[in-house]
């Protein structure tokens, strides 16, 4: 049950594990991220095959969000290497779809939900958003299809400032999937949603990755809404990590070893709850959640 | 009473005046087109206050040009770009930006007043820069305005889509490879040029009526990516050209006409917009008021 004894390639392997079509959606080898003397994680080896669902857990400051920013190319790895669909990590590309935390789009920004999806489709291209004839029809059909696939066609013509949190997240998922990315990065997309909407969005992401073969990297502080769908869990804590199927990683023994302190993993009514006397473990607590909101809201 | 009315509306010799001022009318139309388009992004990027700040420094530049006897448009372009540069560099975050603008604005206005007091020429020229003027736009000035607007329109045509993406959702745009950070100074440059143009017609104090009000009005009645810019341009053009036509015979500055038309359009759009909000925007019927502002639910406990 060390980190090497899991489903990933060993850290010293030079070539990545192959996915269904030969190239993993996301591949990291011996990756390390440090800010000054503080190492967030090191020797991280990770292979996410197309269509695979990876949940990233850990307390605040464990480097969950930084991992995401590294994959997005905003922060370079301190050492090691990585690739998305065989291409080295770097600044943004259409291989990546990104669903952020539910941040309300400014009410002054008058834009229709379907235009948000359209930005995901071709917003990165230069020029005017004007198309004629067949191309116009094709774009329209594609946007309609994306909106339908996330159950958002009903409010496709509504301004985003009038959508509820759950509706906005549906539109965001559609926009993120618009370019048919190899990898869908989700940064706490369920935060600030109620339980029913959490389940809806989680099921939606699962259904999309199954039908399209999109790999999903899902950063979350609460595993429960996505537990039925998760293939691998990456649990970050105290500069170290554990990686493997949920049943192997989310155990009292495993997490106690990771934190270096007694941690209990309880299953209550089918929900996993991590309990510890240590404050830093409390990734399930709502205070933790609230702390993540500052600066972004 | 009729005296006052004659000052505001006077259509004697209208045809002759119209022939004299066709340059101004053309300038107004160009300005409406550019201002209406820029306004869409000013609203989306929440740069209303920045427009005001840039216009005060542009005013300082223009009055300095007047004092030393060079082309006023060149002076205001110079002032605008300087302001846009400083605001763009020092105020990346909205809060910092506000304080930088708050510091720059009175300084620019003060400089402008100083240069104007030193200027020995006619007083109409002096206050024209602040409150707008209908003094005939001469041919060289019109060439300047035309050249600047062609540049602004071309720049907008190239960056429109990524700029829209970066304005709506900067994080997601960056993840897709949109150069979000580079687009910001590019837009400030284009905005600075537009402000410098607008000052020539409506004056520094009233630039917002062309660069913000029309777009704000358009956004009350539609969220369509096509109709917001189209309506914004239409509103801005009605305000400028209509304002010039009304102001022709009167003896007061042009700006009250433009700002009043602009404001009137906005009021009508607001009323239409709230009627539409009550009726609902889409097939799903009336939307609750501002659902995005609801208090946060208490996480997983809430649903159990």
Image: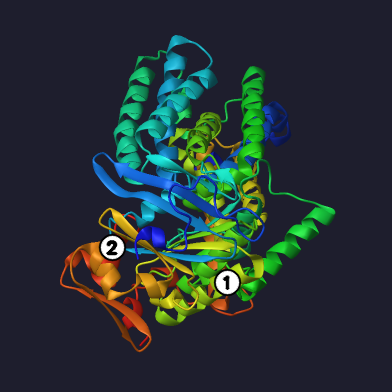
Question: In this rendering, is residue B296 above or below B127?
Answer: below
> Residue A4 at what x, y percent from top left?
40, 58
Label placed on residue A140: none
Residue pointed to by mark 2: A59
Which quadrant, please, contains the N terminus of chain A? bottom left
Residue pointed to by mark 1: B276
> Residue A107 at what x, y percent from top left?
46, 61
Q: CA distance from mark 2 to mark 1?
A: 45 Å
Q: Note whether residue A183 is visible.
A: yes
Q: Secondary structure at mark 1?
A: helix
Left or right of residue A110: residue B130: left
Left or right of residue A256: residue B70: right
Chain of the residue displaying label 1: B
Q: Secondary structure at mark 2?
A: loop
User: Residue at the location (37% across, 24% down)?
Assistant: B112
Which quadrant, please, contains the C terminus of chain A? bottom left
User: Residue at the location (69% across, 63% down)?
Assistant: A143
> Which residue in the rendered view is the most extreme toward the left?
A277
Q: Nearer the viewer, residue B206 or A283?
A: A283
């Amino acid at each position: 049950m060390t980190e090497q004894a899991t489903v990933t390639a060993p850290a010293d392997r030079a070539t990545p594990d192959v996915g269904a079509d030969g190239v993993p959606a996301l591949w990291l080898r011996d990756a390390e991220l440090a800010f000054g003397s503080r190492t967030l994680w090191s020797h991280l080896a990770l292979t996410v095959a197309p269509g695979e669902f990876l949940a990233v857990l850990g307390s605040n400051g464990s480097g969950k969000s930084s991992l995401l920013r590294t994959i997005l190319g905003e922060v370079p790895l301190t050492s090691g290497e990585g690739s998305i669909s065989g291409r080295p990590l770097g600044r943004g590309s259409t291989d990546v779809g990104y669903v952020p935390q539910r941040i309300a789009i400014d009410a002054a920004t008058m834009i229709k939900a379907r235009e948000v999806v359209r930005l995901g489709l071709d917003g990165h291209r230069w020029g005017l958003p004007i198309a004629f004839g067949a191309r116009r029809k094709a774009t329209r059909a594609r946007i309609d299809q994306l909106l339908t696939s996330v159950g958002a066609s009903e409010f496709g013509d509504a301004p985003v400032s009038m959508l509820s949190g759950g509706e906005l997240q549906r539109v965001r998922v559609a926009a993120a999937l618009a370019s048919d990315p190899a990898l869908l990065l989700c940064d706490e997309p369920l935060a600030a949603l109620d339980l029913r909407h959490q389940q809806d969005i989680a099921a939606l992401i699962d259904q999309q990755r199954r039908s399209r073969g999109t790999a999903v990297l899902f950063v979350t502080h609460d595993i429960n809404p996505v537990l039925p769908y998760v293939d691998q869990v990456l649990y970050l804590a105290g500069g170290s990590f554990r990686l493997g199927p949920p049943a192997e990683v989310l155990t009292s023994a495993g997490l106690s070893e990771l934190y270096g302190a007694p941690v209990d993993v309880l299953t209550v009514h089918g929900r996993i709850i991590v309990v510890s006397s240590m404050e830093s473990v409390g990734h399930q607590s709502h205070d933790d959640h609230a702390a993540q909101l500052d600066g972004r809201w | 009473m009729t005296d006052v009315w004659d000052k505001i509306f006077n259509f004697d010799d209208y045809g002759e005046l119209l022939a004299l001022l066709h340059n101004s009318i053309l300038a107004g139309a160009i300005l409406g087109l550019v201002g209406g388009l820029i306004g869409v992004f000013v609203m989306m990027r929440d740069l209303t206050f920045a427009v005001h700040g840039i216009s005060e420094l542009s005013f300082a530049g223009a009055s300095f040009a007047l004092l030393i006897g060079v082309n006023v448009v060149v002076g205001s372009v110079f002032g605008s770009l300087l302001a846009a540069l400083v605001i763009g560099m020092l105020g990346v975050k909205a809060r910092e930006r506000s304080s930088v603008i708050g510091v720059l604005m009175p300084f620019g206005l003060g400089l402008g007043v100083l240069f104007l007091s030193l200027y020995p020429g006619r007083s109409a020229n002096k206050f024209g820069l602040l409150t707008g003027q209908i003094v005939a736009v001469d041919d060289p000035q019109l060439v300047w305005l035309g050249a600047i607007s062609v540049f602004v329109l071309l720049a907008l045509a190239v960056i429109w889509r990524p700029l829209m993406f970066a304005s709506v959702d900067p994080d997601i745009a960056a993840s897709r490879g949109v150069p979000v950070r580079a687009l910001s100074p590019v837009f400030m440059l284009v905005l600075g040029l537009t402000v410098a143009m607008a000052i020539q017609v409506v004056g520094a104090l009233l630039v917002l009526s062309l660069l913000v009000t029309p777009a704000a009005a358009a956004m009350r009645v539609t969220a369509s990516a096509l109709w917001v810019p189209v309506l914004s341009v239409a509103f801005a053009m009605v305000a400028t050209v209509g304002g010039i036509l009304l102001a022709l015979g009167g003896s007061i500055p042009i700006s009250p006409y433009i700002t009043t038309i602009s404001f009137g359009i906005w009021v009508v759009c607001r009323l239409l917009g709230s009627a539409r909000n009550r009726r609902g925007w889409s097939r799903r019927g009336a939307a609750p008021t501002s659902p995005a502002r609801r208090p946060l639910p208490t996480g997983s406990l809430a649903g159990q």
